[in-house]
Image (cartoon, rainbow, N blue to C red):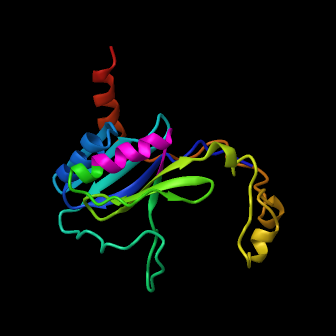
Amino acid sequence: MGKFTGINHLAMVTADMDKTVRFWRDLLGMRLVVGMGHPGYRHYFFEITDRDMIAFFEWPHVQPIAEKDHGAPVRGPLAFDHISFGVETREELGRLKALLEENGFWASEVIDHGFILSLYAFDPNNIPIEFSYSVPEFDVRAHPIMIDSQPTPAALEGSEARTAVWREVLSPAEDIDVYAGEADAVRAAFSKTKP
């Protein structure tokens, strides 16, 4: 079974890239590491960690999503609820709350979920975001738990992958086809930044 390295990037949407850059880069401090675009198209990537990014497409006629409380049930089509970003210390939650509120953004109280402490807010596109501090004494990655009073049958099978559920790839392709996207422009720009 393969091993994942994290979330390479989450791809979101904005109608106003400048507002998005100001929030994610300037307010939250996530470096703008790739900016691709041409008339009618922009795709910008912000660094969350040395492995993880969040990216935004700018589509000028898109409207911000309706504000929806984090975790509140809805009806109809929906793809995701919110994004949570890990922080190193519980004090960082207080700093972020003060920073967001000082700059006109709503921020919740810090909520204790047992294994994480969470602060909730919204970005300028009404994307629901959460900042989470993992409580070291309750490391659910090292010791998974199930406290659902009515867990699904699949969840009752445990936390580890059950590979026998799916067909195994017997002979993986040795070579894969790769099609050009923005590769030439990115590589040319990248070569100019290297000493």
Q: Foreground: 70 or 192? A: 70
Query: Looking at the image, is 190 positioned above or below residue 68?
Result: above
Q: In the displayed structure, would residue 29 be above or below residue 133?
A: above
Main structural element of the magenta stretch: helix, strand or loop?
helix
- The percent coordinates of residue 188 (x first, y second) are 30, 29
| Residue in view at x 31 percent, y 72 percent | 67
Q: Nearer the viewer, residue 129 or 119?
A: 119
User: Total marks drawn?
Assistant: 0
User: Residue 45 sits in which quadrant?
Assistant: top left
Specify whether 78 is left or right of 30. right
Q: Nearer the viewer, residue 131 or 59?
A: 131
Residue 149 is situated, as x and y percent measured from the top left of the image, at: 73, 76
Q: Is residue 54 shown to the viewer in this render? A: yes
Camera-nearest residue between 170 and 75 = 75
Name the residue rendered at 25%, 68% in the picture.
64
Q: Position of residue 69 (x, y in %)?
A: 40, 72
What are the residue bounds of the magenta stretch? 85-99
Q: Is residue 80 magenta?
A: no
**Image position of 146 (left or right of 82):** right
Residue 180 visible, this angle:
no
Q: Residue furthest top?
A: 195
Q: Quadrant of the C terminus?
A: top left
* Res 63 quadrant in image: bottom left
Compared with residue 153, is residue 50 higher up or lower down, i.e. above or below?
above
Residue 170: image x %, image y %? 79, 53
